[in-house]
Amino acid sequence: MINAAIVGLGWWGKVLVQSVQNKSDKIRFTAGAVRTPSKVADFAEEQGFTLHDSLDGVLADDAIDAVVFATPHSRHVEQIVATAAAGKHVFMEKPLTLTKADAEEAVAATQKAGVALAVGFNRRYSPAVAALREQIESDTLGTLLHWEGTMCAPIGMALTADAWRADKRETPAGGLTPMAIHIIDIMIDLLGEVDEVYCQSFRRIVPNDHDDTTSILFRMKNGMSGYVGTLLATHPSFRMHIWGSEGSTEIRNPDMSAFLYTPNNTGQITGAAGVINTDERDFEGFDTISAELEGFADAASGGTPYPVTPAQAIHGCAVIEAIVKSAEGGTAVKVG
């Protein structure tokens, strides 16, 4: 059993705690840290852990094996370096960092200390993603041609002007870091590295100085094209689609429960609407959040390594950096 501390108890920090507390036999939260403990004292008591008013208090506690972070992106590097130096395993909510150089520093610190580093890409654990991986590895889709995805939620409409998620320095390019990066990470894992990106990102309606409409074009190193769209002012939605010469597969719904495989029709187009025979599968009910935290616990215990490799984590941050640069400059940018 891994004894963990949670640093950052906003909405998502609480979701992380509740996904495993008193449910998992691999990880439990025994402590937490926030700037104002009184604001979350009732939650901590309900969940059965003690509170500190700083990360220092957590790192000084020898009974804590690992630290789970749900904190502003700009603080990630210093928090990872300090936690690794204290000999504690690190789970960092995505993105790991906003730049490639910072990601390299963070990874180097954990490797030097010999501790596990996990990035909070819970959607990696979706059984729909596992099914798609099987199709790609078995060549079911044939030569892979194009991928795309959309991930949206109305979270931008509720952000106050002083919220850190409404600060472009913390969350550049609208829904990139809270949402679209999930799809990008999955594509990096399934299809390899990104070569070039082009992004347009702007504000249409959200009541704060933040982008709400973002679209990104991709060119993969394997030759495929790709696209991601993300909106912060519309209903929750998720869709991910890969096309190949032999068929295509779509994953959709916010919980990634719908899996639709459509083989390519044979024969010539005659002008009539062709018959589409789609094989549908349902993956409803799988908890990817508890799965990622238990996966982190396995890695911290010396078991199965966490699925997001250091190289993938660093490359993902390089992609973020290139996307932001493209949005600011209005040109295509090579990924460093």
Image: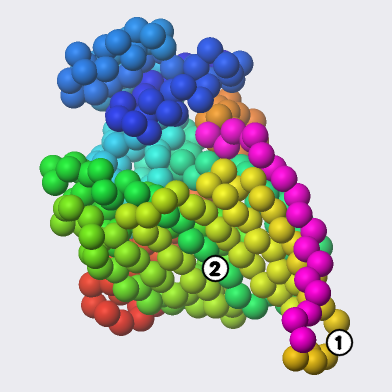
Q: In what quadrant of the picture does the N terminus appear?
A: top right
Label ID, residue 225:
none
What SS does tag 2 mark?
strand
Q: Position of residue 173 (x, y in %)?
A: 29, 62
Q: What element does badge 1 sit on?
A: loop
| Direction from residue 15 to residue 99 in the image, left or right | left
N-terminal-most mark, 2 or 1? 2
Q: Residue at x 30, y 30 (%)?
A: 10
Q: Which residue is mark 1?
A: 267
Query: Is residue 108 in view from this perspective?
Result: no
Residue at x-position 59% and y-position 80%: 223
Residue at 86% over, 87% down: 267
Residue 333 picture quarter: bottom left
Residue 2 as seen in the image, left or right of residue 72: right
Decide: marks 2, 1 in contact (CB < 8 A)? no
**Which residues are drawn in magenta?**
272-289
Q: Quadrant of residue 222?
A: bottom right
Q: Is residue 217 above or below residue 253?
A: below
Q: Identify residue for label 2.
A: 148
